[in-house]
Image (spheres, grey):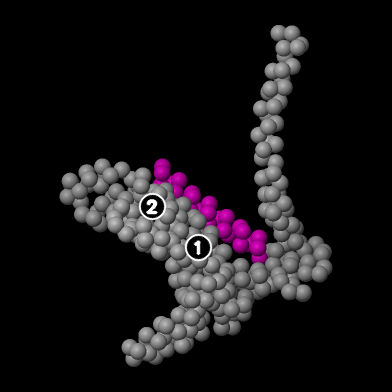
Amino acid sequence: MDRHSRRPASRARTHRAVSPWLFLLPGLGIVAAFNLYPFLTTVHKAFTDARTLTPGTWVGLRNFQDMLEDEQFWVALRNSGLYVLLVVPFTVLLPLLLALLVHKQLPGVTFFRSAFYTPVVASVVVVALIWGWMLDDRGLLNGILRFLGAGPVAFLGDEWLLLLSAMALTVWRGLGYYMIIYLAALANVPRELHEAAAVDGAGALRRFVSVTVPAVRSTMVLVGALSSVSAFKVFAEVHLLAGPTGGPAGQDTTLVMLVQRTGTGLNGRVGYASALSLVVFTIALLLMLLVLRADRKEDR
């Protein structure tokens, strides 16, 4: 092959190697500007005593040492951990049961699917305001309790009831979203498996445990991983129900609320808030890896 015939082939190889990167450049630029750069900046700030109006100086691990002595940090860590432990099981199981109810093509089922999905598209602020009105001392639930002769319950005034109310709100908002994921998984479950199990005399509960659950197990793991990270990073629900102070004596503060409260304002401790953010990121990443690792063990 002479020199003139090799040039077009060389240009074609170069074109094939470079062209995909040219198409990816805009996306990579956006990721670098809005994700990678803020992340690297947060990592750097975590080791400084930066405040809102001052860049700060390098202080090493002092922010993390302060964290260990910060009582509010342990309260926030406890609340975020409880959120994961109590919310995730419900967000894994309840949407699956809901999807089983609406996955068959029956008259009117589209209405119920839309109704269950409505909280997902509704603004969390609007939803929290409605729940706040319902749970208020003079709200709907306490009105019903008074009608039944029971005393009013301080859903928004008690430390634990407020946290449980926020958890219920989170579960309720997530039902429709995770239901759609399960509906896609249920559509791929072979009907023959259910028919064979029914022929063998398996009832509805037995078919659910032996056929449906194994068939959608990978989807359950995905929902578990997504909801774990989401629950650990909860902010809006608790913030809107408890207020910026984090409920009675700040006992309902979560980690992300603590980050927001610490790092904002004219004298915000940006360095300390960055260290808190790094802890939140690390724990969320570990949660995700633990769930995925448990799934891989089940596959072996």
Give percent across and percent down for residue 38.
Answer: 71, 56
Q: Look at the picture and state if 86 lies above or below 113.
A: below
Give percent across and percent down for residue 262.
Answer: 69, 72
Image position of 57 (left or right of 158): right
In the picture, the quarter occupied by the N terminus is: top right
Q: Residue furthest top?
A: 1
Name the image quarter holding residue 67.
bottom right
Q: Secondary structure at mark 2?
A: helix
Image position of 211 (left or right of 292): left
Mark 2, residue position: 183
Name the image quarter holding residue 254.
bottom right
Mark 1, residue position: 121
| Residue at image coords 41%, 86% | 142
Residue 253 or 191: which is nearer the viewer?
191
| Residue at image coords 74%, 67% | 270
Q: Look at the picture and state if 192 lies above or below 237.
A: above
| Residue at image coords 52%, 76% | 129
The residue type indicated by label 1 comes to Val
Give percent across and percent down for residue 243.
Answer: 59, 78
Q: Secondary structure at mark 1?
A: helix
| Residue at image coords 42%, 83% | 140
Tell me, for residue 51, which label it has, or none.
none
Sequence-wise, the earlier of marks 1 and 2 is 1
* Magenta stretch: helix, strand or loop mostly: helix
Which residues make up the magenta segment? 276-300
Give percent across and percent down for residue 211.
Answer: 29, 48
**Do residues under tags 1 and 2 come within 8 Å of each other at their CB atoms?**
no
In the picture, the quarter occupied by the C terminus is: top left
The residue type indicated by label 2 comes to Leu
Q: How many marks?
A: 2
The question of residue 93 being in magenta is answered with no
